[in-house]
């Protein structure tokens, strides 16, 4: 069977995938800490590095001035011949080529938005009810204070009239 020019990727749904976490550190070069841009190289000791970091290690000033035919693995310091067979880490290469950006379906996003809206509306209604209750209490208190002010004004007015009448009577 022939394959189309663009290789079809086989995707599977992993049951309970929402509870699975994958550590991505094996997809990063331990020297430069970048995600491998292409198939990384495996040293004879088994450690994997990006091609750039291996080349930098082999072309370091120490290696250029030295007649040594060995370099050290940046992780385990095992001596590795600079003429080692450049073997690609096919497992990491396959994982990198299989990575796709996951975009949740629009329905999921819409459901999340609707759920968030419902919660927000419920909270707004609760706050509105609470503020209406506070407003009712304030209106009642204002009415009570207005009555007290009228009574006090009447008392003060009556007192002023008595004082005025008393003063006029004495004079």
Image (cartoon, grey):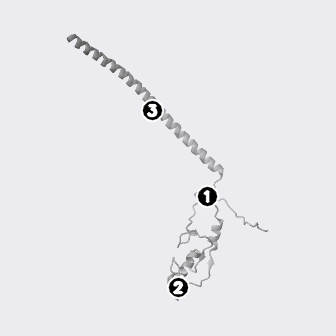
- Where residue 163 appears, x then y in whole percent? 25, 15
Q: Residue furthest front?
A: 171
For disc 2, the marked residue is: 64
Q: CA distance from mark 1 to mark 3?
A: 48 Å
Residues under labels 2 and 3: Cα distance? 81 Å
Circle 3 residue: 134
- Label 1 or label 3, whichever lies nearer to me, is 3
Looking at marks 2 and 1 on the same chain, the residue that comes earlier in the sequence is marked by: 1
Q: Quadrant of residue 17?
A: bottom right
Query: Residue at position x 63%, y 67% from top?
Result: 96
Q: Is residue 130 above or below residue 148?
A: below
User: Which residue is located at x 22 percent, y 10 percent?
Assistant: 169
Q: Earlier in the sequence, mark 1 or mark 3?
A: 1
Residue at the spot of label 1: 17
> Who is closer to the viewer here, 11 or 64?
64
> In this rendering, which labeled residue sits more in front, label 2 or label 3?
2
For the residues bearing labels 2 and 3, Cβ distance under 8 angstroms: no
User: Going 20% across and 11% down the picture, which residue do you hit?
Assistant: 170
Classify mark 1: helix, strand or loop.
Answer: helix
């Amino acid at each position: 069977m022939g394959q189309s020019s663009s290789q079809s990727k086989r995707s599977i749904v992993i049951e309970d995938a929402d509870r699975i976490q994958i550590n991505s550190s094996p997809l990063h070069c331990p020297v430069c800490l970048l995600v491998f841009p292409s198939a990384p190289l495996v040293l004879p000791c088994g450690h994997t590095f990006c091609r750039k970091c291996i080349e930098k290690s082999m072309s370091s000033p120490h290696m250029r001035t030295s007649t040594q035919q060995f370099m050290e693995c940046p992780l385990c310091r095992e001596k590795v011949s600079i003429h080692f067979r450049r073997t690609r880490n096919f497992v990491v290469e396959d994982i990198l080529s299989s990575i796709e950006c996951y975009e949740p379906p629009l329905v999921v996003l819409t459901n999340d938005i609707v759920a968030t809206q419902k919660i927000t509306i419920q909270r707004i209604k609760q706050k509105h009810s609470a503020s209406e209750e506070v407003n009712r209490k304030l209106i009642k208190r204002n009415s009570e204070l207005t009555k007290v002010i009228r009574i006090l004004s009447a008392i003060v007015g009556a007192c002023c009239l008595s004082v005025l009448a008393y003063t006029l009577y004495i004079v």
